Amino acid sequence: PNRILYLVILCMVALSVVVLIRIVGIILVIALLTIPSSICRQFTYNMKKLIISSIVTGIILTLTGLWISYLLDLASGATIILLLALVFLLSFFIKKAVTAVRRLKTR
């Protein structure tokens, strides 16, 4: 069962990359494949939760980036990538701060 699931996910990723490269470009595809999972990976190590939260995070941030680009009349791809990067940095520093506070409390 795990091998089949692995192959299904691998095929879905490959198909997504091929289709999305034609639609939005390689930089946005790479950002959309890596950044949402990097954001969520900081807060969960459970694979099921990671997959679901990465999908939800990617959808929410993509739609938010499209909305911001529409409001400010900016390029949508660049706006989405900048928003993804900003949220990643924010989540990274939040995780560091939470870890530091937990260490101080245990002393």
Image (cartoon, rainbow, N blue to C red):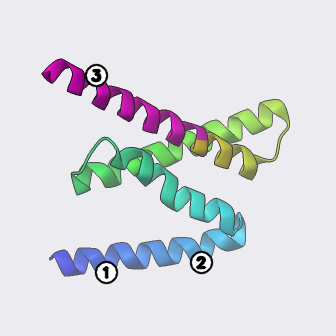
Q: Name the residue under label 1.
A: 7
Q: What residue lies at 78% left-to-right and 36% top-to-bottom?
A: 70
Q: Nearer the viewer, residue 107 or 16?
A: 107
Locate residue 46 relative to residue 32 in the image: left or right. left
Q: Residues within 10 Å of mark 2 (few under 14, many from 20)?
A: few
Q: What residue lies at 51% left-to-right and 52% top-to-bottom?
A: 35
Q: Give the range drawn in magenta.
A: 86-107
Q: Nearer the viewer, residue 34 or 11?
A: 34
Q: Mark 3 points at which residue?
A: 101
In the image, residue 92 lies in the stretch drawn in magenta: yes
Task: Tell me if I can see residue 43 in this picture.
Answer: yes
Q: Chief secondary structure of the magenta span?
A: helix
Quadrant containing the C terminus is top left
Locate residue 75 relative to residue 57 in the image: left or right. right
Q: Specify the amino acid type for callout 2.
A: Val
Q: Specify the amino acid type for callout 1.
A: Leu
In the image, residue 7 lies in the stretch drawn in magenta: no
Circle 3 or circle 1, nearest the eye: 3
Q: State the image quarter where residue 83 is shown.
A: top right
Q: Which of marks 3 and 1 is nearer the N terminus?
A: 1
Q: What residue lies at 36% left-to-right and 34% top-to-bottom?
A: 95
Q: Do the residues labelled 1 and 2 touch (CB within 8 Å)?
A: no
Q: Where is residue 51 in the image (x, y as percent from the top left)?
A: 33, 55
Estimate the spatial distance between the alpha carbons at disc 1 and disc 2, rounded to whole Å: 17 Å
Local SS, label 2: helix
Q: Which of marks 1 and 2 is nearer the N terminus?
A: 1
Q: Position of residue 49 (x, y in %)?
A: 26, 48
Q: Specify the amino acid type for callout 3.
A: Val
Estimate the spatial distance between the alpha carbons at disc 3 and disc 1, rounded to whole Å: 41 Å
The tag on residue 18 is 2
- The single residue placed furthest to the top in the displayed view is 105
Q: How crowded is mark 1: few (under 14 residues within 10 Å), some or many (20 or more)?
A: few
